[in-house]
């Protein structure tokens, strides 16, 4: 997966198991695959138990052959039928829970199930006036949309520590996605893959992020609101 991410032009579809029944998630995953998405991420801010994650993944796997990546909010959502997990460190959080606490609770569970961990430096960028759910929860060392040098410090740290990738998160349903200039600036500094998500709503935006240096684009809310739009986004990402 990491090798494929390095090649770039990938799209990951985020499905929140709390937003619909598992059977519906299965139908959504089939469409995501049909439209050309490369993986299904499963997670969301309210998910509290691995059962709901397990059942959702079961239906996704019945309906598509895409790899499934857990996108965890805590260790309690780790279900044994996933292929991968973003083993994340929210590197600009000031809370122990998001830096080490949940990771220590989850490590042995990941090992027990044989899920492949993707060491992910998760960075939340504050692009909008209205704080997103993750911003409210995570007690951040705030990185605003113009704090490019600060972001460079964080992502260099991530590369030097040995993370597999960096995930720039504007927050689900953010008014504005992570700015292209920020992506361009960090692309010059690091060689690990860059995942970008939060507030990406059309093909033009997705393409601009890819051209700025993003290796992977994540869309979530759009899949719930207007899954047909995914087609346009993926076409723009894949087009050379
Ligand atoms: C959220 O980056 C993801 O964690 C996707 O965001 O729901 O805005 O697409 P959206």
Image (cartoon, grey):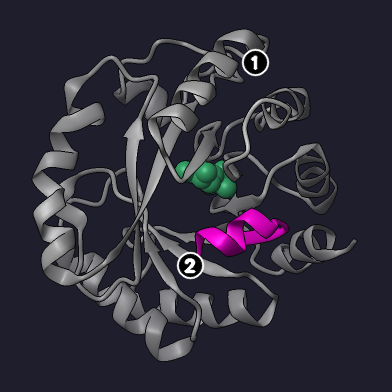
Secondary structure under the numbered disc 1 in the rendered image: loop
Local crowd size for mark 2, using a 10 Å CA cut-off: few (<14), some (14–19), many (≥20): many
Of residues 101 and 114, which is closer to you in this image? 114
Q: Which residue is mark 2?
A: 40
* Image quarter in which the C terminus is found: bottom right
Gap in Å between the C-alphas at discs 1 and 2? Answer: 28 Å
Q: Which residues are magenta?
A: 1-12
Residue appearing at x 20%, y 66% in the figure: 79
Q: Position of residue 55 (x, y in %)?
A: 24, 76
Q: Position of residue 232 (x, y in %)?
A: 80, 63
Which circle's residue, 1 or 2, is located before the other in the chain?
Answer: 2
Determine the residue located farthest toward the bottom in the rendered image.
Answer: 62
Number of on-image labels = 2
Residue appearing at x 16%, y 70% in the figure: 113
Q: Is residue 124 left or right of residue 73?
A: right
Q: Is residue 178 left or right of residue 85?
A: right
């Amino acid at each position: 997966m990491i090798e494929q991410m390095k090649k770039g032009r990938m799209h990951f579809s985020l499905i929140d198991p709390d937003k619909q029944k598992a059977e519906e998630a299965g139908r959504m995953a089939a469409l995501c695959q049909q439209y050309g998405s490369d993986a299904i991420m499963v997670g969301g801010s309210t998910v509290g138990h691995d059962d709901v994650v397990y059942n959702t993944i079961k239906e996704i796997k019945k309906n598509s052959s895409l790899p499934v990546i857990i996108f965890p909010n805590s260790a309690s959502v780790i279900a044994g039928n996933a292929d991968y997990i973003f083993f994340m460190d929210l590197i600009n959080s000031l809370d122990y829970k998001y830096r080490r606490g949940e990771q220590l609770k989850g490590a042995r569970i990941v090992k027990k199930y044989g899920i492949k961990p993707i060491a992910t430096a998760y960075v939340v960028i504050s692009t909008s006036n209205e704080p997103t759910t993750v911003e409210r929860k995570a007690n951040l060392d705030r990185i605003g949309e113009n704090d490019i040098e600060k972001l460079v410090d964080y992502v260099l740290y991530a590369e030097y520590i040995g993370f597999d990738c960096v995930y720039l998160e504007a927050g689900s349903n953010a008014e504005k996605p992570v700015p292209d200039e920020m992506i361009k600036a960090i692309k010059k500094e690091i060689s690990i893959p860059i995942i970008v998500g939060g507030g990406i709503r059309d093909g033009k935006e997705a393409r601009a992020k890819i051209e700025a240096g993003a290796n992977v684009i994540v869309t979530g809310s759009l899949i719930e609101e207007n899954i047909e739009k995914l087609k346009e986004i993926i076409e723009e990402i894949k087009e050379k």
